[in-house]
Image (cartoon, rainbow, N blue to C red):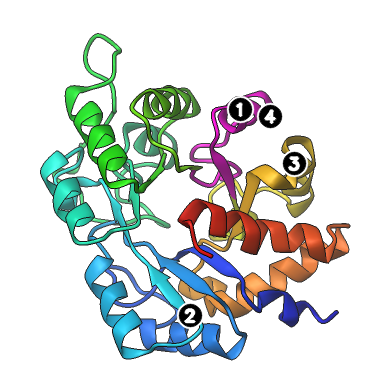
Amino acid sequence: MKIEKLLQGAFDLHVHAVPDVVPRAQTLPELARAAAQYGMAGLLIKDHTAPTVGRCFTMNEMSPGSVRFFSALALNPPVGGLNPCAVESALRKGTDVIYFPTYGAKNHIAIWGAGKPPTAFPLPTPDYSGLSILDENGKLHQDSEAILRLIARHDAVMATGHLSPVESLLLLRSAVDFGIQRLLVTHVSESVNAMSLEQQKEAARLGAFLEHCFFAVTDSCPKSVSLDWIAEQIRFIGVENVILTSDFGQVSNGPPVEGFCFYLGKMKRLGFSDEELRTMIQGNPRKLLRER
């Protein structure tokens, strides 16, 4: 089977596009046309600085067809950080995924730096130290708890963002306690929040899907990893627990859909069957999004 055929009915749940506060490879309409050409089922549009629900609603209304756009809110400084009010507003509008802090997370800044590429997004001050989900006593912050309650009430997807692995696991345990049923660990291979194999196993035991992004193997990613290492992690944890995404949109990585297809071809050459790849780009995303 030609690798392009794998994209028929596939989802890429981590894509960046124009408009954004940094240059991106394609506009939303360009991205939609490319995804439709390959017969893809859906794309999740992520913006680190603003909710994408309005954009995705418009794209779904204006370009009906096989490709559905899914929306997200990332809890970074431009939306008030760990801001329950912003979360409630986004969820009432129909946002699909709530990401805990990404580039604004204390962990992200400690590892990748503040306001530096590839995440040179706005911060309140030059010496900004970042957001943590924990209070001064090391317990889950009351705003974090309020956000979890909102996600549970609206039955949305909770994603861990760029928190540390320890924070992410604590958040996942708390999410389960609050009744959240749809959990996603954000790009477990990328150096900013890479989980050990045992931590990944714990996250899967808690019911989370583990996201592996192809961005992690590109030169755009600080301390990039090999595709062989990603494959080894997937084999350890099992394809039934994994969602493959691109995390593309960077100008240097070119058009996201074509890039996604390219790396799926590489995964096939590493020994993953068509059925296994379909599980990670079709079956598991459908389960997470509750798509038929």
- Label 4 sits on residue: 197
**Mark in front: 1 vs 4:** 1
Tag 4 or tag 1, which sits nearer the N-term? Answer: 4
Location of residue 203 in the rendering, given as x and y in whole percent from the top left corner: 56, 30
Instruction: Determine the secondary structure under disc 1.
Output: helix
Name the kind of residue labelled 3 in the image.
Answer: Gly
128, 164: nearer the viewer: 164
Q: Distance between the residues labelled 2 and 4?
A: 34 Å
The magenta-colored residue range is 185-211
Mark 1 → mark 2, Cα distance in angstroms: 31 Å
* First of labels 4, 3 by sequence position: 4
Within-10-Å neighbours for mark 2: few <14, some 14–19, many 20+: many
Rendering quarter of residue 201: top right
Label 3 to label 2, Cα distance in Å? 27 Å
Seen in the picture, residue 133 relative to 189 is either above or below; the reply is: above
40 left or right of 26 in image? right
Could you tell me the amino acid type at mark 4?
Leu
Percent from the top left, x then y, of residue 254?
54, 78
Magenta span contains residue 190? yes
| Disc 3 to disc 1: CB gap under 8 Å | no
Residue projecting furthest to the left: 85
Q: Mark 3 — residue?
A: 238
- Can you identify the residue that label 2 sits on? 67
Q: Which amino acid does label 2 sit on?
A: Val
Q: How far apart are marks 4 and 3 (CA)?
A: 11 Å
Q: Which of marks 2 and 4 is nearer the N terminus?
A: 2
Look at 32% across and 69% down and name the residue there.
22
Residue bearing mark 1: 205
- Element type at mark 4: helix
